Image (cartoon, rainbow, N blue to C red):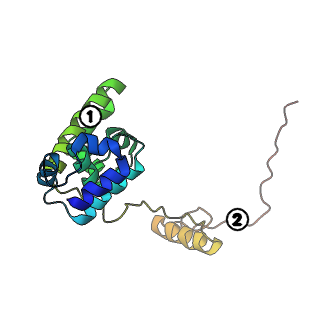
Amino acid sequence: MRTLWVRMAEIYGFRWSSAYGENPNVGAAVTWAKGLAGLSGRQLADGLAACIASAEPWPPTLPQFRMMCLGIPPFDAVRADTGKQDGFTRLVWQYLDGHRYRMASADKADRLLLAAYNRAKEAAMRGTELPPAPEAQITHEQAKAMPATRDQVARHMDDIARELGIGMAGEPEGATVEQGAPEQVEVAHAA
Protein backbone atom coordinates (compact mmCIF):
# COMPACT_ATOMS: atom_id res chain seq x y z
CA MET A 1 0.00 0.00 0.00
CA ARG A 2 2.89 2.29 0.76
CA THR A 3 4.29 1.96 -2.77
CA LEU A 4 0.88 2.68 -4.29
CA TRP A 5 0.45 5.74 -2.04
CA VAL A 6 3.84 7.11 -3.08
CA ARG A 7 3.20 6.47 -6.80
CA MET A 8 -0.20 8.19 -6.68
CA ALA A 9 1.35 11.18 -4.90
CA GLU A 10 4.02 11.31 -7.61
CA ILE A 11 1.39 11.22 -10.36
CA TYR A 12 -1.16 13.63 -8.85
CA GLY A 13 0.95 15.66 -6.44
CA PHE A 14 -0.90 17.85 -3.96
CA ARG A 15 -4.28 16.77 -5.36
CA TRP A 16 -3.66 13.22 -4.11
CA SER A 17 -2.40 14.09 -0.66
CA SER A 18 -5.09 16.72 -0.07
CA ALA A 19 -7.82 14.27 -1.08
CA TYR A 20 -6.54 11.09 0.60
CA GLY A 21 -3.77 12.11 3.01
CA GLU A 22 -0.07 11.48 3.03
CA ASN A 23 0.08 8.58 5.48
CA PRO A 24 -0.46 5.16 3.80
CA ASN A 25 -1.30 3.52 7.13
CA VAL A 26 -4.38 5.46 8.32
CA GLY A 27 -7.62 7.00 7.13
CA ALA A 28 -8.42 6.60 3.45
CA ALA A 29 -5.43 4.32 2.92
CA VAL A 30 -7.05 1.63 5.09
CA THR A 31 -10.21 1.78 3.00
CA TRP A 32 -8.18 1.68 -0.21
CA ALA A 33 -6.29 -1.36 1.07
CA LYS A 34 -9.58 -3.19 1.67
CA GLY A 35 -10.99 -2.09 -1.69
CA LEU A 36 -7.93 -3.29 -3.58
CA ALA A 37 -7.52 -6.55 -1.65
CA GLY A 38 -7.23 -9.55 -3.93
CA LEU A 39 -5.73 -7.63 -6.85
CA SER A 40 -2.37 -8.79 -8.12
CA GLY A 41 0.72 -6.63 -8.38
CA ARG A 42 0.30 -6.73 -12.16
CA GLN A 43 -3.25 -5.40 -11.88
CA LEU A 44 -2.15 -2.59 -9.57
CA ALA A 45 0.62 -1.73 -12.05
CA ASP A 46 -1.99 -1.68 -14.83
CA GLY A 47 -4.07 0.74 -12.75
CA LEU A 48 -1.09 3.04 -12.24
CA ALA A 49 -0.27 2.89 -15.95
CA ALA A 50 -3.88 3.82 -16.74
CA CYS A 51 -3.62 6.81 -14.38
CA ILE A 52 -0.48 7.99 -16.13
CA ALA A 53 -2.02 7.49 -19.58
CA SER A 54 -5.25 9.31 -18.78
CA ALA A 55 -5.53 13.02 -19.33
CA GLU A 56 -7.50 13.42 -16.11
CA PRO A 57 -5.70 15.85 -13.77
CA TRP A 58 -7.59 14.70 -10.66
CA PRO A 59 -6.90 11.40 -8.89
CA PRO A 60 -9.45 8.63 -9.34
CA THR A 61 -11.79 7.47 -6.63
CA LEU A 62 -11.28 3.99 -5.21
CA PRO A 63 -13.95 2.43 -7.48
CA GLN A 64 -12.50 4.21 -10.52
CA PHE A 65 -9.00 3.00 -9.70
CA ARG A 66 -10.24 -0.56 -9.15
CA MET A 67 -11.88 -0.38 -12.60
CA MET A 68 -8.55 0.74 -14.07
CA CYS A 69 -6.76 -2.15 -12.36
CA LEU A 70 -9.29 -4.65 -13.71
CA GLY A 71 -9.03 -3.25 -17.23
CA ILE A 72 -12.63 -2.00 -17.38
CA PRO A 73 -12.65 0.60 -20.15
CA PRO A 74 -14.83 3.72 -20.08
CA PHE A 75 -18.29 3.49 -21.62
CA ASP A 76 -17.25 5.45 -24.73
CA ALA A 77 -14.47 2.96 -25.44
CA VAL A 78 -16.95 0.08 -25.24
CA ARG A 79 -19.35 1.89 -27.56
CA ALA A 80 -16.54 2.36 -30.07
CA ASP A 81 -15.37 -1.30 -29.85
CA THR A 82 -17.73 -2.69 -32.49
CA GLY A 83 -15.39 -5.60 -33.20
CA LYS A 84 -15.83 -6.92 -29.65
CA GLN A 85 -12.06 -7.45 -29.36
CA ASP A 86 -11.77 -6.45 -25.71
CA GLY A 87 -12.66 -9.05 -23.06
CA PHE A 88 -14.80 -6.59 -21.13
CA THR A 89 -16.67 -5.59 -24.30
CA ARG A 90 -17.46 -9.26 -24.93
CA LEU A 91 -18.88 -9.38 -21.38
CA VAL A 92 -21.03 -6.32 -22.10
CA TRP A 93 -22.43 -8.04 -25.20
CA GLN A 94 -23.38 -11.04 -23.07
CA TYR A 95 -25.69 -8.72 -21.10
CA LEU A 96 -27.10 -7.04 -24.22
CA ASP A 97 -30.04 -8.18 -26.33
CA GLY A 98 -28.38 -7.78 -29.72
CA HIS A 99 -31.62 -7.82 -31.67
CA ARG A 100 -33.23 -5.07 -29.59
CA TYR A 101 -29.99 -3.08 -29.78
CA ARG A 102 -29.82 -3.27 -33.59
CA MET A 103 -33.50 -2.43 -34.02
CA ALA A 104 -33.54 0.50 -31.56
CA SER A 105 -33.13 4.18 -32.33
CA ALA A 106 -29.73 5.68 -31.53
CA ASP A 107 -30.89 7.07 -28.17
CA LYS A 108 -32.58 3.84 -27.14
CA ALA A 109 -29.56 1.80 -28.31
CA ASP A 110 -27.27 3.94 -26.14
CA ARG A 111 -29.51 3.37 -23.12
CA LEU A 112 -29.54 -0.39 -23.74
CA LEU A 113 -25.77 -0.45 -24.14
CA LEU A 114 -25.27 1.65 -21.00
CA ALA A 115 -27.49 -0.70 -18.98
CA ALA A 116 -25.49 -3.71 -20.23
CA TYR A 117 -22.23 -1.84 -19.53
CA ASN A 118 -23.30 -1.14 -15.93
CA ARG A 119 -24.27 -4.79 -15.36
CA ALA A 120 -21.00 -6.02 -16.84
CA LYS A 121 -19.02 -3.45 -14.84
CA GLU A 122 -20.62 -4.61 -11.59
CA ALA A 123 -20.00 -8.26 -12.46
CA ALA A 124 -16.34 -7.57 -13.29
CA MET A 125 -15.87 -5.57 -10.08
CA ARG A 126 -17.21 -8.56 -8.14
CA GLY A 127 -14.69 -10.85 -9.81
CA THR A 128 -16.54 -12.36 -12.78
CA GLU A 129 -14.10 -13.78 -15.32
CA LEU A 130 -13.99 -11.93 -18.62
CA PRO A 131 -14.91 -14.06 -21.63
CA PRO A 132 -11.82 -15.42 -23.38
CA ALA A 133 -10.89 -14.30 -26.85
CA PRO A 134 -12.23 -16.52 -29.63
CA GLU A 135 -9.93 -19.43 -30.45
CA ALA A 136 -9.74 -18.48 -34.11
CA GLN A 137 -11.42 -16.18 -36.53
CA ILE A 138 -14.02 -17.85 -38.70
CA THR A 139 -13.17 -17.45 -42.34
CA HIS A 140 -15.16 -18.33 -45.39
CA GLU A 141 -13.06 -19.67 -48.19
CA GLN A 142 -14.46 -19.56 -51.67
CA ALA A 143 -13.30 -22.04 -54.25
CA LYS A 144 -11.80 -20.39 -57.29
CA ALA A 145 -13.72 -21.20 -60.43
CA MET A 146 -11.50 -22.80 -63.06
CA PRO A 147 -12.81 -23.09 -66.61
CA ALA A 148 -12.97 -26.61 -67.97
CA THR A 149 -10.47 -27.68 -70.60
CA ARG A 150 -11.60 -28.82 -74.06
CA ASP A 151 -10.83 -32.43 -73.14
CA GLN A 152 -12.92 -32.20 -69.94
CA VAL A 153 -15.84 -30.70 -71.87
CA ALA A 154 -15.59 -33.42 -74.54
CA ARG A 155 -15.58 -36.19 -71.90
CA HIS A 156 -18.61 -34.69 -70.13
CA MET A 157 -20.48 -34.30 -73.40
CA ASP A 158 -19.71 -37.93 -74.27
CA ASP A 159 -20.99 -39.02 -70.83
CA ILE A 160 -24.20 -37.01 -71.27
CA ALA A 161 -24.69 -38.38 -74.77
CA ARG A 162 -24.29 -41.97 -73.55
CA GLU A 163 -26.79 -41.36 -70.72
CA LEU A 164 -29.34 -39.94 -73.14
CA GLY A 165 -28.63 -42.60 -75.72
CA ILE A 166 -27.75 -40.18 -78.50
CA GLY A 167 -24.69 -39.78 -80.70
CA MET A 168 -22.55 -36.71 -80.80
CA ALA A 169 -24.42 -35.28 -83.78
CA GLY A 170 -27.54 -35.03 -81.66
CA GLU A 171 -29.30 -37.95 -83.39
CA PRO A 172 -30.33 -41.14 -81.64
CA GLU A 173 -27.60 -43.76 -81.79
CA GLY A 174 -27.82 -45.92 -84.87
CA ALA A 175 -29.28 -43.12 -87.00
CA THR A 176 -27.29 -42.17 -90.06
CA VAL A 177 -26.20 -38.68 -90.80
CA GLU A 178 -26.22 -37.62 -94.41
CA GLN A 179 -22.95 -36.42 -95.76
CA GLY A 180 -23.11 -33.18 -97.61
CA ALA A 181 -22.50 -29.49 -97.48
CA PRO A 182 -23.54 -27.69 -94.38
CA GLU A 183 -26.73 -25.74 -94.67
CA GLN A 184 -26.33 -22.14 -95.63
CA VAL A 185 -28.23 -19.60 -93.56
CA GLU A 186 -28.96 -16.20 -94.96
CA VAL A 187 -29.10 -13.32 -92.56
CA ALA A 188 -31.17 -10.32 -93.59
CA HIS A 189 -29.89 -6.98 -92.42
CA ALA A 190 -32.39 -4.30 -91.60
CA ALA A 191 -31.45 -0.99 -93.16
Q: Position of residue 160 (x, y in %)?
A: 50, 66
Residue at the (31%, 52%) spot, across then down:
8
Q: Which mark is residue 130?
A: none
Q: Can you see residue 85?
A: no
| Residue type beneath disc 1 | Leu
Q: Position of residue 110 (x, y in %)?
A: 31, 30
Residue toward you, 64 or 137: 64
Q: Residues within 10 Å of mark 1 (few under 14, many from 20)?
A: some
Whether residue 148 sits left or right of residue 108 in the image: it is: right
Q: Amino acid at mark 2?
A: Glu
Q: Which residue is mark 1?
A: 114
In the displayed orientation, state which residue is furthest to the right: 191
> In the picture, residue 105 is in which quadrant?
top left
Give the residue pinned by disc 2.
178
Front-most of residues 72 and 85 = 72
- Foreground disc of the pair 2, 1: 1
The first of marks 2 and 1 along the sequence is 1
Residue 69 falls left or right of residue 150 = left
Asked if the residue under mark 1 is in contact with the one under mark 2, i.e. CB atoms within 8 Å, the reply is no
Q: Secondary structure at mark 1?
A: helix
